Image (cartoon, rainbow, N blue to C red):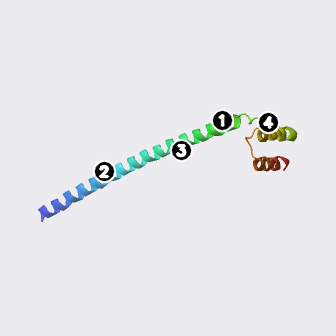
Amino acid sequence: MPGLVRGVARTAVIAGTATAVSNRVSRRQANRWAAQEDEQYAREQNAYQQGAASAAAAPAPAAAPPAKDTVTQLKELADLRDQGILTDQEFAAQKAKILG
């Protein structure tokens, strides 16, 4: 019987040690993952803040150039038609767009 008790005790010690080591490894790995997630979160926040700052500091787009005078546009279309670049149908369609 003493040999049996010694074997059971040895098994219990080995199982307890294995459990303790396994738990410590799991905690250490979880801490590493948490640290990596914190670093990733900080990098993303930094990139977001830099993007927001650069968007706020970006100059406003230039105003659109003023629309050409309707008469000037019609004269240019007529010149293109006279040169044979536009057909009468294309000229009529563009004229309708300009006149609205």
Q: Is residue 74 left or right of residue 53?
A: right
Q: CA distance from mark 1 to mark 2?
A: 49 Å
Question: Which quarter of the image is occupied by the N terminus?
Answer: bottom left
Q: Residue at x 38, y 47 (%)?
A: 28
User: Mark 4 or mark 2: which comes first in sequence?
Assistant: 2
Q: Residue at x 50, y 43 (%)?
A: 40
* Closer mark to the observer between disc 2 and disc 3: 3
Q: Nearer the viewer, residue 58 or 30?
A: 58
Per the image, label 4 sits on a secondary structure element best described as loop
Q: Is residue 75 left or right of residue 11?
A: right
Q: Residue at x 39, y 48 (%)?
A: 29
Q: Position of residue 70 (x, y in %)?
A: 86, 41
Q: CA distance from mark 3 to mark 4?
A: 44 Å
Q: CA distance from mark 2 to mark 3?
A: 30 Å
Q: Nearer the viewer, residue 24 or 47?
A: 47
Q: CA distance from mark 4 to mark 1?
A: 26 Å
Q: Position of residue 20 (x, y in %)?
A: 31, 52
Amino acid identity at mark 4? Pro
Amino acid identity at mark 2? Val
